[in-house]
């Protein structure tokens, strides 16, 4: 073999690949691939711009010409968020992350538990006004949150004055207000999913001696795992990203959630766009990781029923 044989073989492989692509590609496939490329770019580029801007300097962000790739992997913005010894400013963002976790996780858990019991009752039990109740619950969800916040705040304040707790800077109260937003749609989603699970399976379990709660725990819930995961992620995402109610109920900086703290950084007298982008990236990553890790359950929960075939 000569020294040119490996190069000639590589060149032949490239030509074969090009010929194969030329035979495979046609106008419908080309248009589809182009549409997918545009679609993915529209989805991924804003996240890339946010994450890359967190490593840029203020001059790179505020310049007339856009800088698509930062000049270096600068962690200055992240140090300003978390390092108490930072020479310019310390935002103590870790406290805000913890506050958001304290609100989002209980909201998701309580919403799943309450909506499971309520949805099962609507799907399986017979009582007067069942459909009207389900439709009225969904109707409440159609009202914008800004219309409900004033009566909800007044109601919670009156209850707090009677019982003896302060509604301001109270994370438990904020969880309660988020449940008012998330429970209607969670109940509606689970009720429709429970209807797709054959009642014969539960009746067989009842005949075998299971109680109603035993049927729910051993039969219904395992079949409804995809729907439960979908509801949990949906309610977690609402509580994680919510801004308006947190702005009304929280006054102390130590109780701020991440959306409120990001707004505070954005409105700081000295512009700090790279710090805003860093905080936004940190806030976005958990939701993205959840979606990617539980994508299979999400797909099944939104499209599949209890029985296949």
Image: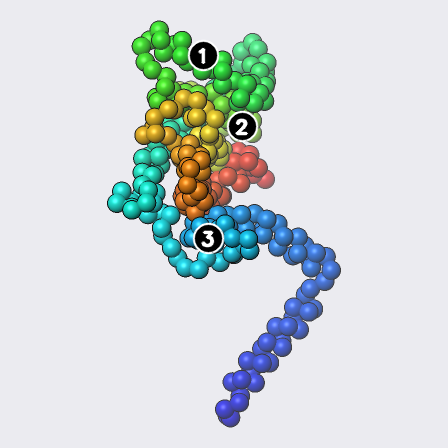
Q: Name the residue at 43% across, 26% down.
A: 246
- Mark 1 near mark 3, Cβ–Cβ under 8 Å? no
- Does residue 216 sit above or below 226 in this rendering? above
Q: Which mark is residue 189?
A: 2
- The residue at 54%/51% (across/down) is 45
Mark-to-mark CA distance, 2 and 3? 48 Å
Disc 2, disc 1: CB below 8 Å?
no
Q: Secondary structure at mark 2?
A: helix
Q: In terms of image quadrants, where is residue 294?
A: top left
Q: Which residue is mark 1?
A: 154
- The picture quadrant where one finds residue 175 is top left
Residue at 54% in and 11% down: 127
Q: Which residue is mark 3?
A: 59
Q: Is residue 120 above or below residue 234?
A: above
Farthest residue in the right direction?
27
Q: Give left or right: position of 267 versus 20.
A: left
Say which element carries label 3.
helix
- For the residues marked 1 and 3, what is the alpha-carbon distance in whole angstroms? 46 Å
How many angstroms separate mark 2 from mark 1 (CA)? 29 Å
């Amino acid at each position: 073999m000569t020294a040119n044989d490996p190069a000639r073989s590589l060149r032949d492989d490239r030509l074969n690949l090009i010929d194969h692509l030329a035979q495979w590609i046609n106008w419908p496939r080309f248009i589809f691939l182009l549409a997918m490329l545009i679609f993915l770019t529209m989805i991924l580029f804003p996240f890339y711009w946010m994450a890359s801007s967190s490593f840029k300097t203020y001059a790179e962000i505020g310049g007339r010409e856009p800088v698509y790739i930062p000049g270096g992997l600068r962690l200055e913005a992240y140090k300003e968020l978390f390092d108490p010894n930072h020479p310019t400013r310390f935002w103590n963002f870790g406290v805000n992350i913890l506050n958001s976790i304290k609100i989002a996780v209980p909201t998701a858990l309580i919403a799943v538990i309450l909506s499971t019991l309520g949805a099962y009752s609507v799907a399986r039990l017979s009582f007067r006004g069942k459909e009207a109740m389900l439709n009225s619950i969904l109707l409440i969800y159609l009202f914008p949150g800004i219309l409900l916040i004033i009566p909800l705040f007044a109601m919670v304040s009156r209850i707090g004055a009677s019982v003896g707790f302060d509604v301001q800077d109270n994370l438990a109260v904020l969880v309660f207000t988020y449940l008012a937003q998330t429970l209607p749609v969670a109940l509606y989603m689970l009720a429709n999913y429970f209807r797709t699970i054959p009642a014969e399976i539960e009746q067989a379990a009842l005949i075998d001696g299971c109680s109603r709660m035993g049927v729910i725990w051993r039969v219904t819930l395992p079949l409804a795992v995809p729907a439960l995961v979908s509801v949990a992620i949906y309610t977690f995402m609402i509580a994680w990203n919510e801004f308006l109610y947190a702005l009304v109920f929280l006054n102390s900086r130590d109780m701020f959630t991440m959306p409120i703290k990001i707004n505070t950084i954005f409105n700081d007298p000295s512009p700090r766009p790279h710090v805003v982008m860093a905080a936004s990236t940190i806030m976005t990553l958990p939701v993205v990781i959840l979606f990617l890790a539980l994508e299979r359950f999400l797909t099944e929960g939104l499209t599949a029923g209890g029985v296949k075939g």
